[in-house]
Image (cartoon, grey):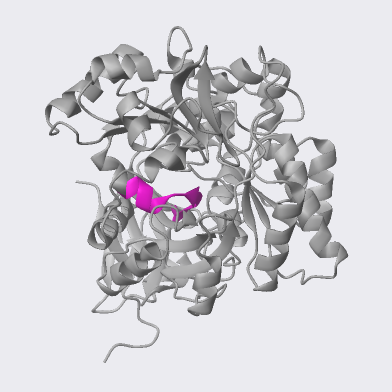
Amino acid sequence: MQSSHEADLVLRGGRIWTGYGNPIVEAVSIRGNLVLATGSDAEVAASCGPNTKIVDLDGRFAMPGLNDAHLHLISTGLLRGKVDATPAAAPTRAALVAALQKRAAETPKGGWVTARGFDQTRYDDGLMPTAQELDAALPDHPVSVTRACGHVTVANSRALSLAGIDINTPDPDGGVIGRQNGHLTGLLAENAQDLVYNVQPTPALDEIVGAIEAGSHHLLQFGITSCMDAATGQIDGMTEIDAYQKAERAGRLQVRVWATLLGDPATTIVESCHAAGFVYGSGSDMFRIGGVKVFTDGSAGGRTAWMRQPYSGEPQNFGVQMLPDEQLFELVDRYTALGYPMVCHGIGDAAIDQLVRAYERLRAAGSSHSLRHRIEHCGYADEALNQRMLQAGILPAPQQAFIYDFGDAYISVLGPERGLRSYPIATWDRLGMKPSTGSDSPVCSPNPFPNLYAMITRKTHKGTVMDASEILTPEQALRAYTEHGAYSQCAEQVKGRLEPGMLADIAVFSNDLLTASPEDILQATYCEMTILDGRIVYERA
């Protein structure tokens, strides 16, 4: 019979970071799905028994499993079915067109060709693709190409026709249909994208379950054991809740998910979830119902984030305001009355101000202070907004991968004064606002190393330093990726640190993330092993 003090699994012989402010230890023992003890090899050896599996770390670095505090797990899993339009795969518009043509050659005439990931600011001319060039290259297929940010799509004429869009179609609420010189450009921003998405084939339940499994396995390869799914219901409503439950029952959900429910007026699943018993905090340690997501603006790189000042070179463009104050306030009041915290999308300073006002109203009305409201992305908050957020207990939930991938684009579209101050994570950290971090995958890759690199250098992929005063120490960066992510989900008592009684979610890396050079973290670091719930679920071959 196994002793209650005997470990099931022991990691020894390494450098183990157990959490911010804790000393580095050599070993950690696990019983069941919980951490049993940490300390020196000799101290932890006391918990070893005849049935204990021992893993020699051989000097490698271990830490709490990473928590990507904002991504889209189902979309990440579904991405494999789309043409890869990211700058790495298609660095020019010509390369993008060639990739689309290659997919078209494999697709029956009339079948959809879809792509995701382009960033026009990386092209030599900085111009968006157009319907006209997509028409010329792919005359026999409807085509939609979504920008990396997910807030702008370019469609060809066949796709626009199937969606019922012509030059006289009015812009939908919270959306923009691109027009120039009396012709459609193919550009669809924000809610206008839905016109095309709604006529594309919807994935079946089993396909969504497969995407959850594929997305989970992808995250485990990076040491990510927890994530927030940022807008559950965006692809096929309540079917996604069913898919998560089916995936969990079948053991195909391999990361912990905090599910944010889509709450936009036309597509909300919140009332349906509440009526079905999916209330805030319900579920399991693998799949738990979180807050409610409402979009208030777009993206800075796509020039649709709602700003107080116009975009560079476009004096009439302040971005897109998705909802008037009255409608947003009514939604926030309704969803918080049902018991859900708000985790709303707001990038531009005007959008952040609108959300802060909505959340401040809750405080003024005496609403419960136990709900931790967040602002997702929170790209352009000035000192006054930060102080108001601090007073109202609002958590910023940024993605520092944006600095690495899109920082130069922010300077291009906003100018240096605003662009360099994007996503001020060190300011939030100094104020004690517990900023988390994430990838917003598939907007950026969930690969954590560019994210960590950006936090400790503030450098873009081109080497531009985006305001060195916002640099974090390596330990602060790891805290954002673990403990602060857990805090943002009200889960800091069970995960985010490796201490006795906490969940045994562990990532093992080839380099010491506290002492390695930023360049080595970016270019020469790998996840060697991932442990979830006390089980080894990934090992690098």
Q: Residue at position x 19%, y 33% from top?
A: 110
Viewer-proximal residue among 87 and 114:
114
Quadrant of res 216: bottom left
Task: Tell me: 83 left or right of 45.
Answer: left
Up-down relation of residue 253 to residue 283 (above or below): above
Q: Where in the figure is residue 173, as x and y percent of width and height?
A: 60, 42
Is residue 92 visible to the viewer in this orientation of the structure? no
Up-down relation of residue 209 to residue 458 (above or below): below
Q: Residue at position x 51%, y 45% from top?
A: 438
- Asked whether residue 70 is drawn in magenta, I would say yes
Magenta stretch, residue numbers: 63-77
Q: Where in the figure is residue 148, as x and y percent of width and height?
A: 44, 31
Furthest residue toward bottom:
1
Viewer-proximal residue among 10 and 286:
286
- Asked whether residue 155 is drawn in magenta, I would say no
| Location of the N terminus (image quadrant) | bottom left
Q: Where in the figure is residue 219, as x and y percent of width and height?
A: 35, 50
Up-down relation of residue 215 to residue 469 (above or below): below
Q: Residue at position x 87%, y 63% from top?
A: 364
Q: Residue at position x 71%, y 28% from top?
A: 469
Q: Where in the figure is residue 432, as x and y percent of width and height?
A: 75, 51
Viewer-proximal residue among 526 and 371:
371
Viewer-proximal residue among 519 and 187:
187
